[in-house]
Amino acid sequence: MPEPAYVSIAGEYARRIRSGDIAPGSQLPSYAEIAQQNGVSDIVVRKAIELLQGQGLVRSVRRRGIFVTHRPSLVRISPERQMQDAETSFRNEAVSTVNVVREVARIPATKELADALSVSPGDEIVHVVTKASEGGRPISISDTYQPPDVTGVSLAAYLEETLSDRLPVETHSEWLRTTPGDLVKRVSQRFITFNGRVIMLSDISYPRDRYDSYTFRMALNG
């Protein structure tokens, strides 16, 4: 299927902003100008700007216009963003090609993992290491653990996320090329079913200088 016009417009601005072609603090053209340049309606432009705002790339200043932020924020939409694969999550953030590599193995559960996943120590669980790089620069690494009878997070009803500045574990430090003593941004996740069973644990590390801030947004129902 062809890419929606608003996604194409947002993607082009995102690439120009991240490459420095549009400098931080710069004002974007007006809605009418963007619409005329791309042959689309104001509604399409509005959706494109909302997508850029959702990525933390631009901000709206009342009665003045849309301006490029000084450093992008990481906006994590829970659980919607977490249903995406890494390729989709990073696609509109990237200036260069994003490469994602996954390593999947079955390992015996440590006591800590066994307690969290409601299995016995030594039971086999699935361990997935996901490494992402942009233009050859490592930008993310995660360790994900699941019981062998569960695939994905479609059964999850709740997502808990904890953000912290932490010293990375050795494998994360090696991938992100941090120097001794450097901290990383760590997001720890627990995907939980309605009956309280944890079906996935994930620890994700990002370089601290990749994002200016982290915003957590969740849809509230009922």
Image (spheres, rainbow, N blue to C red):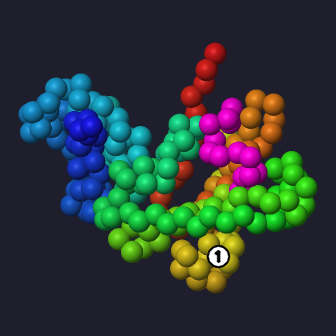
Q: Quadrant of the N terminus?
A: top left
Q: Establish if 53 lies above or below 187.
A: above
Q: Position of residue 124 (x, y in %)?
A: 80, 60
Q: Depth check: 189 or 16 in front? A: 189
State whether residue 205 appears in this view: no
> On the picture, is 67 further left or further right than 181?
left
For the point 70% across and 45% down, the residue is: 150
The quadrant of the image that shows the C terminus is top right
Please provide percent x and percent y for residue 88: 42, 49
Mark 1: few/some/many CA within 10 Å (<14, 14-19, 20+): few
Q: Quadrant of residue 99?
A: bottom left
Asked whether, in this view, residue 71 is left or right of residue 156, the answer is: left
Name which residue lies at 35% across and 39% down: 51
Q: What span is in magenta?
A: 145-158
Residue at (47%, 71%) from the top-left corner?
Answer: 138
Mark 1 lies on residue: 171
Dot 1 falls on a residue whose secondary structure is helix
The amino acid type, in three-letter code, at marker 1 is Thr
Farthest residue toward the top?
A: 222
Can see residue 9?
A: yes
Q: Magenta residues: mostly which secondary structure?
A: loop
- The part of the image, by quadrant, that contains residue 35 is top left
Residue 17 in the image, given as x and y percentages of width and height: 28, 56
Residue 148 located within the stretch drawn in magenta: yes
Instruction: Identify whether 213 is placed above or below 172.
Output: above
Residue under the image location 44 percent in, 68 percent down:
133
Can you give x and y, in whole percent of width and height, for residue 202 in the image?
67, 55
Magenta-colored stretch includes residue 116: no
**Foreground: 4 or 205?**
4
56 vs 2, left or right, is right
- Location of residue 5 with respect to 222 vertically, above or below: below
